[in-house]
Amino acid sequence: MKPDVEPRILILHATAGSGHRRAAQALDAAFRTLAPSAHVRTLDTLQFGSPLFQRGYTPTYDTLVGRVPRVWGLLYKSLEQPRIHRGTTPLRHALDRVNVRSLVAFIERERPSAVVCTHFLPLEALAPRRRRGSLGCPLHCVITDFTAHPFWAIDGIDTTFVASVAVREELASWGVPWERIEVSGIPIDPRFARGPSPRAEARAQFQLAPDRPTILLMGGGNGVGPLATLAEQLLGLPMQPQLLVVCGRNARMRIRMRAIAELAPGRVRTLGFTDQVPALLSAADLIVTKAGGLTCSESLAMGTPMVVFRPTPGQEERNSAALAVAGAAVRARNLEDVAAAAGRILAHPALAASMRASARILARPHSAEDVARRILLLPPREGAAEPEAPALPAPVPDPTAVGNVVWDKDLPGA
C-alpha cells in the first residue's frame, strides 16, 4: 500500500464467538484514528454465504462449545494431527470458497487497499487468489488467541499478526515463513491503552463500596457457564466481596442473578451485554472468567489478576495454560475451587501484586494501533516494543497443583 494514497481497508471477521468480531472492531477504531480519511469497512464474512450456511455456521459452533465442549475439544485436537489436517484441508477450503463465493466478487468491486481477517474463514476463501496474484491487494491475518491451530497456517497470506513469540514459533512449526509472522499482541479496544482509571472512581460508576474487595465475574458475550453458582460461592468468602456480574445476552441469567442479589443487599451488580469493560476491570481486584483471547488480553492490559474456570477445550484451554505458566492467571480445575483461588488472591497482597506485574509484562494495550500502523505503512509508534517482545512462555505439561487449583511454582503465597 502506498502511504500517500487514501487507503481503503476491508476488515473481515466471522460470528463464531465474540472475540473475532471484537478484534475487528478494535482494528476498525485504530484505522479510523490513524487515517481519518481512510475508507474502512468491517463486515461479517457470513453475510456473503448462502442462507443455509448463515443459519448453520454460528449455531453449530455455539452448540459444540456450549453444550458438548468435549466434542469440540476432540475435533480441535484431531485436526491438529498432520495426517488428518492434510487430508481434510483441501475439502474444507473448497467448501468455504463455495459458501462465501460472493465475497470475491465484492472485493473485486470494492478494490480495497488491504484486507485484514480476524477469522480463518475468509482467509480460506481469499488466500488462493492472493497466492496466484489475482486478489489485487495484500491479505493480512490476525490470530485472536494465545495459540495457533493449523487452521491459521494458510499459504498466500502476506502477514500474520500474533499474540507472542511463542505463538510465532508455533505457527512457524506449521510451515508459515518466520518473516511473515509479526508479534503484535491481540487487537483490543484502543481505550485499554489509557490504562485503568482510579479504582474509587470506577467503583462509584457502578454504585459499589469503595473499600470492599471486588470481583468481576464474566461468562463471555453470551453469558455462558454457571455464573449463578459461582456468584453464590464467591459471596460466601470470609472477606465478603462485592461482585460485578456480566451476563451478556443471557436474559435468564440476569433474572437469576437479580434473585441472588436480593440475598446479599448492596454486594451484587448485574449487567447485560456491555462495552464498559475498561471501567469494570478498573473497579475489580480480580476477574473470574473463561479464557477467550480478547478477554484475557483486556485483563492483561489493565493488570487485573485472572481466575479461569471451565475453559473451552482447545484454544481456551491453551490460553489459560499459557497465562497460568506466565504468572498472570490461576486455573481452577472445578467450580468449587474458583472461590478458593479468588479468596487466596484477595488474602495475599504479594500474590496479587505478582500477578499484576506478570500481566503488565505480557500486556499489549496498543496492539490494535500497532497492527494498523504496520498495514498502513506508518512509522512505528514512539516507544513501541521491539517485535520480539514480550515472549509468552509455552504451556508446560505438569504445573504445580495445590488441591485442584493450579498455581505457578514461583508465585508468592503458592
Image (cartoon, helix red, strand yellow):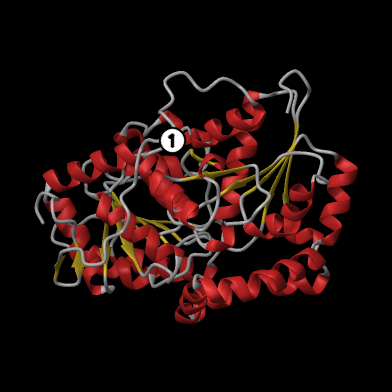
> What residue is disc 1 on?
365
Amino acid bearing label 1: Pro
Q: Which residue is pictured at 68% across the width and 60% down the height?
A: 121
Screen quadrant of the N terminus: top right
Q: How many marks?
A: 1
Residue 124: x, y in percent? Answer: 70, 59
Q: Which residue is pictured at 43% across the width and 40% down the height?
A: 278
Q: Secondary structure at mark 1?
A: loop
Screen quadrant of the C terminus: bottom left
Few, some or many residues within 10 Å of mark 1 (<14, 14–19, 20+): many
State left or right for residue 71 relative to residue 24. left
Q: Nearer the viewer, residue 18 or 270?
A: 18
Q: Nearer the viewer, residue 66 or 383?
A: 383
Residue 94: x, y in percent? Answer: 76, 68
Q: Nearer the viewer, residue 73 or 23?
A: 73
Q: Is residue 370 visible?
A: yes
From this view, report whether residue 120 is shown above or below residue 226: above
Q: Quadrant of residue 280?
A: top left
